[in-house]
Image (cartoon, helix red, strand yellow):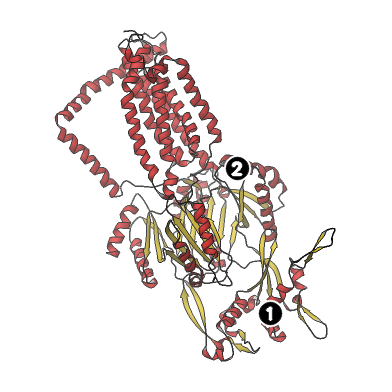
C-alpha cells in the first residue's frame, strides 16, 4: 500500500513531522541552538542556591558567661520569636559573649515578611543588659564561597591586615564580584591601662577615667545659623582616633590651674583586641579573604577574574616577605563534575552507538546517538526556562537520566528497523513504527515523570535543594520524547532497504559481525528467553513469589544497613582538615602547640607519599594552615553560615591537596588519622576531607529537663559508641566546662552603701575592661577600653588583692565585701524549642558498620 492510500499515516503530528523534513530539522536545530545559547547563561554553582526559611537573631554580649547570656538575652528572644506565625522550630545557643536564636519557618512562609516581623519583635524587647550590643536580625542564607585566599607573611600584624583589606577592596571592585569578606584577624583596639596604685593616689576609678575619655573625644553638631544669604553649620570637633590623641585628654584639673593628662597616669596600647584567634600558613601569620557569589553570578567567571587580578595587580606589588595563596577554589570541583558529566555522556553515546551498530544498523545507531545529543543539549534550554542551575545535583540527574532516555529512541528506532526488514516503504515504515510505539513510549515516560514528581513535594530546605534533580530528569524525558517521536522518524525514513549488500571491505566486515550478533540474539530469543517466558506464563505463582522475594530482599538490605541511604553523597574535596578540642580553659599557646604536633604528623605523611611515589607532588608542595580559636568549617547547604566567638581551646590543622598528589584527599585523611593516633589531652580530634559538611552517620539529639541528668545520659551514649567496632570521631556539643569564680555580695557590704551593681561593674572594669567609646578606624568600629594592667589581672591572687571603692570614697579589700566560690560552668548552652539539648555524633567505617544500625540499637539499649 502506498503512503498516499494508507489512512494510518496521513494524520497526526508524527505523520506530519515525518513527512515534512523542514519541520523536523527545524525543531532539531531549534533545540540545539536554544540549548547552546542557554549553556552560556546558566548559573554554575556547587549546590543549588535555596532559601533556608530561617531567621537568625544574634546579640553579642562581650565578657558575659553562657548562663548570663541565656537568662538575659536568649530566653527573651525565644519568647518573642516563638509566637510568630509559621514558626516550625526554634534553635538557640548561648556561648561566652554571644547569644543566638534561629527560627525555622514552615515551607511556603513569606520569609521577607517573617524577617520584618522578627525585627519588630526583637526591637520591642526593652530590657537587654546595658553591656549587650545591638541585635542583628538577618535571614540565614547558604551563601557559597567561590574562592578563598590566604594573605600570609612574616610581617607585623597591622601591615598584613591592611594588605588584606587592600586586596579585598580590589577584588570587590571587579565587575564579576559582589561580595568579599576578610576574616581570621583580631580587631583594632586601644587599651588604656591604669595601675591600681595610681588610681588610689588620685582618688579616681576606672569609670571616672572612662567618663573623662568620652567627654574629651567627640564630634557634635550644634545645628546651623541662618545669616540671610546662607546657612552656616556649627559643629564641635574633637574626636580622637590615634593613641597620641588620647594621651592628651585631660583627666583631672587642679585648683592651681595645672592639669593631669591621660598619658601621665596610664599606659596606652594602640594594638589589637586580646582574643584567642590565630591563623598561620606554613608557619607565618595569615588572614583569610573569601570571595562568595550571589544567586545570579557565575563560579567560573568569578574564579578567573580573581586569579587574573591577583596575577596582574596584587602579586607583582606585594612587599618582601608577603604572599597570597589560593587556598581553596570551588570552581575546580564544579569543573570536575562537568568533566564527569561530559565523559559519561560521551561514553554513553559511544556504547549506544556500538550496540545499535552491531545489533541493528549503523545509520540507525548514528541517528539514535544524535538524538540523545539533541535531548541533552535541549535540556539546557529547559533548565534555563525553569531556573535550574548547573550544579552537582543537576549534573548527577543528567547522568542518571542518560540511561533512561536512551530507551525511547531505541524502542522507536528498533520498531522502524524491524518494519523496514519487511520491505516496506521507508517513510511509511517510519510513520507506522513511531505511531505503533507512541502509546507505550508516552505512558512509559509519564510514569517515570510521575515518580520523579514525588521529589518535588519534599518539604523544607531539603526539598528546595533536591528540586533540581526531578526537574532535570523531567525536562530531559520530555525533550527525549519529542525527539524520538517527532524528529527521529523523519531521519530513519532514509534507512536502506533489506538485502542491501556492502560494497566496501569495512562494510562487509561490519555486515558479518552484525549477522553473527543477530544469530546469537536469535538463539537467545528462541531458546532461554522463550523457555523462561513459557515458565512464567504457565506458573504465575512463581512470578509473584519471585517479585515478592525481590521486594523483601531490597527491604532487608536497606533496613540492615548493607545498602546505605544518603541524602547527599560526600564530594571529594581538595582540603583535608583535622579539628580538635582541648579541655575547656586551655590557653591558646597550648592549643597552638597541639596544632603544630598534628601538623607534623601530616607532614610525615606527605614526605612518605613523596618518597613512595616518585614524580608525584613533593612534600613541600603540601601547604598547611593552623587555626586557633575556631574550627575549620565546610559549606553546609542545610545550615547556612553561622557566627561564633573565638575559643582558646579549639583549633584546626588543614592541608591543601596539591596538583599531582599521589593519593586523593580521602586517602590522605586516612593515612593522617593513622599517623596521628591518639593525642594525649585532647577531648576531640576529627578528620575530614569532603567538600561539604554533611550530617554525620550517627547523630543523636538528647533532651532532659535536668542538665546534670542530660550530661550523664550523653556520656553513657559516648561510652557505648566507644565499644562499637568501626565507630570513630565520637563527640558531643557539651564539654567539661570552664572553672569560674562566682562572687556574691556579703551582708556587711550593704552597710557600707555598696550594691551588687557596684561590685559587678568595678570587677568587670578592672579585669575585663570598661568600654569608654568606639571610633571608626577605616572600616572597623575600634573599641577603647579602660582596665588594669595585665600584670594586675592575670592570677587568682590579683583578684584577692583587688580593692573595691565604696560610694563614700573608702576602699575595702574584695574579700571583706564579697565571697568567692569556685564552680564549673558550661561554655555553651544549646536549646531546641526551649528544651536544653545535647547532641552526640560519630563517623563510621561503612565496611564495618552503618549509622542506620547503630542509632536504633543505642536508643533501644539505653533509653528503653
Residue 488 relative to residue 183: left or right = left
> Residue at 37% of width from left, 39% of height from top?
453
The quarter of the image holding the C terminus is bottom left
The quarter of the image holding the N terminus is top left
**Where does label 2 land, which residue?**
302
How far apart are labels 2 and 1 at the CA level?
52 Å
Tell me residue 344's x, y (percent).
44, 33
- Most extreme residue toward the front is 228
Q: Is residue 442 above or below residue 852?
A: above
Is residue 583 in view from this perspective? Answer: no
Q: Which one is nearer the viewer's eye here, 209 or 659?
A: 209
Q: Earlier in the sequence, mark 2 or mark 1?
A: 1
**Where does label 1 land, which residue?**
208
Assess disc 1: are there few (<14), some (14-19) or many (≥20) residues with their C-alpha within 10 Å of its C-alpha.
few
Count of marks placed on residues: 2
Residue 778 relative to residue 634: left or right = right
Q: Is residue 458 above or below residue 498?
A: below
Considering the numbered disc 2 on the image, is that residue within a helix, a strand or a loop? Answer: helix
- Image quadrant assignment for residue 709: bottom left
Tell me residue 8's x, y (percent).
32, 15
> Residue at 45% of width from left, 19% of height from top?
24
Instruction: State which mark lies toward you, 2 or 1.
Output: 1
Tell me residue 241's x, y (percent).
73, 65
Q: Is residue 629 above or below residue 559?
A: below
Q: Is residue 301 above or below residue 168?
A: above
Amino acid at each position: 500500500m502506498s503512503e498516499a492510500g494508507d489512512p494510518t499515516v496521513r494524520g497526526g503530528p508524527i505523520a506530519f513531522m515525518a513527512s515534512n523534513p523542514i519541520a523536523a530539522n527545524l525543531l532539531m536545530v531549534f533545540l540545539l541552538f536554544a540549548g547552546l545559547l542557554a549553556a552560556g547563561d546558566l548559573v554554575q554553582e556547587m549546590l543549588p542556591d535555596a532559601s533556608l526559611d530561617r531567621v537568625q537573631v544574634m546579640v553579642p554580649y562581650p565578657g558575659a558567661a553562657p548562663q548570663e547570656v541565656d537568662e538575659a538575652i536568649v530566653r527573651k528572644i525565644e519568647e518573642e520569636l516563638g509566637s510568630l506565625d509559621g514558626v516550625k522550630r526554634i534553635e538557640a545557643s548561648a556561648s561566652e559573649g554571644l547569644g543566638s536564636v534561629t527560627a525555622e519557618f514552615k515551607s511556603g512562609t513569606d520569609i521577607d515578611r517573617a524577617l520584618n516581623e522578627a525585627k519588630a519583635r526583637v526591637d520591642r524587647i526593652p530590657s537587654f543588659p546595658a553591656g549587650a550590643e545591638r541585635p542583628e536580625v538577618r535571614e540565614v542564607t547558604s551563601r557559597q564561597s567561590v574562592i578563598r585566599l590566604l594573605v600570609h607573611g612574616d610581617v607585623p600584624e597591622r601591615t598584613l591586615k591592611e594588605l588584606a583589606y587592600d586586596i579585598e577592596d580590589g577584588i570587590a571592585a571587579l565587575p564579576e564580584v559582589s561580595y568579599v569578606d576578610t576574616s581570621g584577624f583580631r580587631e583594632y583596639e586601644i587599651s588604656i591601662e591604669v595601675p591600681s596604685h595610681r588610681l588610689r593616689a588620685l582618688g579616681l576609678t576606672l569609670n571616672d577615667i572612662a567618663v573623662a575619655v568620652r567627654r574629651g573625644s567627640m564630634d557634635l553638631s550644634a545645628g546651623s545659623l541662618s545669616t540671610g544669604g546662607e546657612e552656616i553649620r556649627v559643629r564641635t570637633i574633637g574626636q580622637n582616633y590615634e593613641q597620641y590623641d588620647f594621651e592628651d585628654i585631660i583627666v583631672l584639673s587642679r585648683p592651681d590651674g595645672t592639669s593631669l593628662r591621660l598619658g601621665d597616669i596610664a599606659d596606652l596600647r594602640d594594638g589589637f583586641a586580646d582574643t584567642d584567634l590565630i591563623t598561620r600558613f606554613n608557619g607565618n601569620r595569615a588572614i583569610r579573604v573569601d570571595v562568595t557569589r550571589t544567586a545570579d553570578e557565575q563560579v567560573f567567571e568569578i574564579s578567573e577574574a580573581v586569579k587574573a587580578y591577583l596575577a596582574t595587580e596584587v602579586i607583582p606589588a606585594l612587599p618582601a616577605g608577603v604572599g597570597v595563596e589560593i587556598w581553596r577554589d570551588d570552581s575546580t570541583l564544579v569543573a570536575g563534575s562537568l568533566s564527569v558529566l561530559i565523559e559519561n555522556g560521551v561514553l554513553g553515546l559511544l556504547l549506544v552507538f556500538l550496540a545499535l551498530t552491531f545489533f541493528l544498523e549503523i545509520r540507525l545507531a548514528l541517528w539514535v546517538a544524535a538524538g540523545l545529543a539533541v535531548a541533552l543539549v535541549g535540556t539546557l534550554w529547559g533548565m534555563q526556562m525553569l531556573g535550574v542551575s548547573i550544579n552537582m545535583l543537576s549534573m548527577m540527574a543528567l547522568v542518571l537520566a542518560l540511561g533512561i532516555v536512551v530507551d525511547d529512541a531505541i524502542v522507536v528506532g528498533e520498531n522502524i528497523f524491524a518494519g523496514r526488514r519487511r520491505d516496506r516503504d521507508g517513510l511509511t515504515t517510519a510513520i507506522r513504527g513511531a505511531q505503533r510505539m507512541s502509546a507505550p513510549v508516552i505512558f512509559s515516560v509519564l510514569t517515570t515523570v510521575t515518580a520523579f514528581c514525588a521529589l518535588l513535594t519534599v518539604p523544607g530546605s531539603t526539598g528546595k535543594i533536591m528540586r533540581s534533580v526531578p526537574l532535570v530528569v523531567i525536562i530531559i524525558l520530555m525533550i527525549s520524547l519529542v525527539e524520538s517521536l517527532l524528529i527521529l522518524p523523519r531521519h530513519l525514513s532514509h534507512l536502506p532497504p533489506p538485502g542491501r549488500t556492502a560494497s566496501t571491505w569495512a562494510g562487509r566486515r561490519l555486515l558479518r559481525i552484525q549477522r553473527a550478533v543477530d544469530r546469537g540474539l536469535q538463539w537467545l530469543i528462541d531458546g532461554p528467553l522463550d523457555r523462561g517466558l513459557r515458565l512464567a506464563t504457565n506458573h504465575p505463582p512463581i512470578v509473584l513469589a519471585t517479585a515478592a522475594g525481590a521486594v523483601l530482599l531490597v527491604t532487608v538490605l536497606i533496613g540492615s544497613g548493607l545498602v546505605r541511604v544518603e541524602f547527599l553523597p560526600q564530594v571529594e574535596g581538595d582540603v583535608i582538615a583535622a579539628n580538635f578540642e582541648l579541655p575547656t580553659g586551655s590557653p591558646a599557646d597550648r592549643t597552638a602547640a597541639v596544632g603544630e604536633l598534628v601538623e607534623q604528623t601530616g607532614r610525615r605523611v606527605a614526605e612518605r607519599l613523596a618518597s613512595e611515589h616518585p614524580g608525584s607532588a613533593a612534600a613541600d608542595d603540601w601547604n598547611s594552615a593552623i587555626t586557633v580559636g575556631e574550627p575549620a568549617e565546610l559549606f553546609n547547604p542545610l545550615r547556612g553560615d553561622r557566627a561564633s566567638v573565638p575559643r582558646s581551646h579549639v583549633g584546626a590543622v588543614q592541608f591543601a591537596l596539591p596538583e599531582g598528589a599521589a593519593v586523593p584527599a580521602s586517602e590522605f585523611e586516612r593515612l593522617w588519622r593513622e599517623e596521628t593516633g591518639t593525642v594525649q589531652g585532647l577531648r576531640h580530634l576529627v578528620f575530614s576531607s569532603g567538600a561539604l559538611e554533611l550530617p554525620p552517620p550517627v547523630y543523636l539529639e538528647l533532651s532532659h529537663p535536668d542538665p546534670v541528668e542530660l550530661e550523664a545520659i550523653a556520656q553513657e551514649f559516648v561510652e557505648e559508641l566507644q565499644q562499637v567496632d568501626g565507630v570513630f570521631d565520637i563527640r558531643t556539643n557539651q564539654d567539661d566546662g570552664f572553672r569560674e569564680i562566682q562572687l556574691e555580695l556579703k551582708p556587711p557590704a550593704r552597710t557600707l552603701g555598696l550594691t551588687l551593681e557596684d561590685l559587678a561593674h568595678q570587677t568587670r572594669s578592672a579585669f575585663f575592661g570598661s568600654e569608654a567609646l568606639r571610633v571608626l578606624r577605616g572600616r572597623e568600629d575600634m573599641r577603647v577600653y579602660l582596665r588594669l594592667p595585665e600584670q594586675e589581672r592575670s592570677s587568682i591572687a590579683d583578684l584577692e588583692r583587688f580593692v573595691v571603692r565604696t560610694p563614700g570614697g573608702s576602699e575595702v579589700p574584695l574579700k571583706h565585701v564579697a565571697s568567692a566560690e569556685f564552680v564549673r560552668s558550661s561554655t555553651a548552652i544549646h536549646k531546641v524549642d526551649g528544651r536544653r539539648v545535647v547532641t552526640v555524633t560519630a563517623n563510621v567505617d561503612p565496611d564495618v558498620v552503618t549509622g542506620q544500625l547503630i542509632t536504633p540499637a543505642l536508643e533501644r539499649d539505653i533509653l528503653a
